[in-house]
Amino acid sequence: MPATIVIFGASGDLTSRKLIPALYQVFRKGRLSQPLNIVGVSRSKFSHEQWRAELKKTTAEFTGKAFDEQKWSQFADQIFYLPGDIGQFEDFVALAKYLEELEAGHSNTRVYYLSTAPRFYKQAIEHLGRAGLADEAQGPRRVVIEKPFGSDVKSACDLNHATHEVFDEHQVYRIDHYLGKETVQNLLVLRFGNTIFEPIWNRNYIDHVQITVAEEVEVGSRASYYDTAGVVRDMIQNHLLQLLMVTAMEPPVRYEADSIRNEKVKVLQAIRPLEPESIREDTFRGQYRGYTASEGVKPTSRTPTFAALKLSIDNWRWQGVPFYLRSGKALSCRTTQIVIQFHAPPHKLFDDSPSSLGESNRLVIQVQPAEGIQMHFQTKVPDAGMRMRQTDLNFNYQREFRGAMPEAYERLLLDALEGDASLFARADEVEAAWRVCDPIIAAWESRDKPTLFMYDPGLWGPEECCEWMTAQGREWFDTCPVLG
Ligand code: BG6
């Protein structure tokens, strides 16, 4: 069945940087199983031709060597633009009429992509409903909702409620682009497509898990949004908790949206709620020096740009295994990695046997930008008695597979067009994720808030955070990955 994707917020950054380049790539690679029309909607007054010309420039810039003039002109023939204001119901009536003409009355899959500022989500959804655009009589109708999905559990529940007034849950695709990353999907394959990892993936073998999403960049042009959000809302509630769920979930019964999401939600439900006293001990917040000088940030801002949390998962598999989550801006390097730290050997047979955790087996899953997996283990140094040294088995995507890794949005847009919600968050999942974060945010914003530690850009966050980890007998795996 042919498909139409309607992008609200068509003149925004996400559309030109990510959505159109991703759609162009799937078109160029021949991955679209159906003819696709793209309709952009926003308040700017573009003609079809003007919008196409804008998108050509940006797509060439963001796809680099993959840009091909001829392919682009075939692709661009299917791009249309309709000026419209989310606040004006008549514009949705006009959109409905326009889509009918474009699709010539044939059955058609439609995906409405909300790439606007979040404050417009509810109104866009309500107007889609009133204009009859959610009605599935003429084919599937889906809505894709960008993050942030709410700013706490209450607003997320409200948004879910407003969405369900118009769309049934099977029509709703809440996006978290981390799930579209190949290396995150590979975590499912590593765990459930192999036999050797699952038996050791539990408290009997694993001391703790570290999930780090470090960014080298500062807040930049998004400073005014960021200052109202902070690192927990911006990164932890969504991306880091998604990585945690995929790392910690039980094997799903089938590779199918609800089986997967049922298991993911159970992980969030098993996270021990952080009480005010434990928030003081088990969470850590920081801000990089210079943050308050950014344009758009209040000079007195106490917004955290760095967070580290220690979470416990109360179930059979993970009892007693802390999950450390850490994320920040202006850190040493850009790296997203999941470190599975195994226990030290129980008996010290060799003088050199690992006595500290840092020398014990470790599985490092490099999510980005150095996509790969390393297994660290001790090896006998040749010709040196029984001396040992840590070495590694190193799997690297670039070496193993040819071609550039696809952008996360390619996979997610294809899945939304094809109706596969496996890599999208369900209503209960986003609400449960906020339930984990809300007490932390509340304590961090309360009068009795814990210290905000300052750090210099270019480090791994505040020094005190390393001391906090050392005091627990553990070390952060602070290694910038080697690219290439
Ligand atoms: C976004 C956050 O969701 O993810 C940004 O709002 C962050 O602050 C970005 O920079 C990181 O995404 P990626 O794919 O570059 O790791």
Image (cartoon, grey):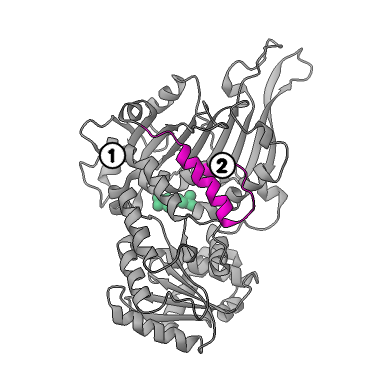
- Residue 265 position within the rendered picture, expressed as x and y whole percent measured from the top left: 49, 46
Q: Quadrant of the N terminus?
A: bottom right
- Residue 439 position within the rendered picture, expressed as x and y whole percent measured from the top left: 32, 38
Say which of 161 and 32 sits in front. 161
Q: Which mark is residue 56?
A: none
- How crowded pointer 2 is (Cα within 10 Å; few <14, some 14-19, many 20+) is rated as many
Label 1 residue SS: helix
Please tell me how many numbered marks the rendered image carries. 2
Label 2 residue SS: loop
| Residues rendered magenta in the picture | 245-274
Residue farthest along the right direction in this orientation? 383
Q: Which is more foreground, mark 1 or mark 2?
A: 2
Residue 372 seen anywhere in this rendered image of the structure: yes
Does residue 464 lie above or below 288 as drawn?
A: above
The three-letter amino acid code for the residue at tag 2 is Met
- Pointer 2: what residue? 249
Q: Is residue 124 left or right of residue 411?
A: left
Residue 335 seen anywhere in this rendered image of the structure: no
Q: Is residue 260 magenta?
A: yes
- Pointer 1: what residue? 442
Say which of 95 and 352 sits in front. 95
Say which of 232 and 276 sits in front. 276
Q: Is residue 469 left or right of residue 438?
A: right
Determine which quarter of the picture holds residue 378: top right
Lower sequence index among marks 1 and 2: 2
Task: Please name the residue shown 48% across and 86% down the image.
Answer: 102
Does residue 70 lie above or below 261 as drawn?
A: below
Q: Is residue 398 magenta?
A: no
- Residue 284 position within the rendered picture, expressed as x and y whole percent measured from the top left: 36, 31
- Residue 158 position within the rendered picture, expressed as x and y whole percent measured from the top left: 32, 57
The three-letter amino acid code for the residue at tag 1 is Ala
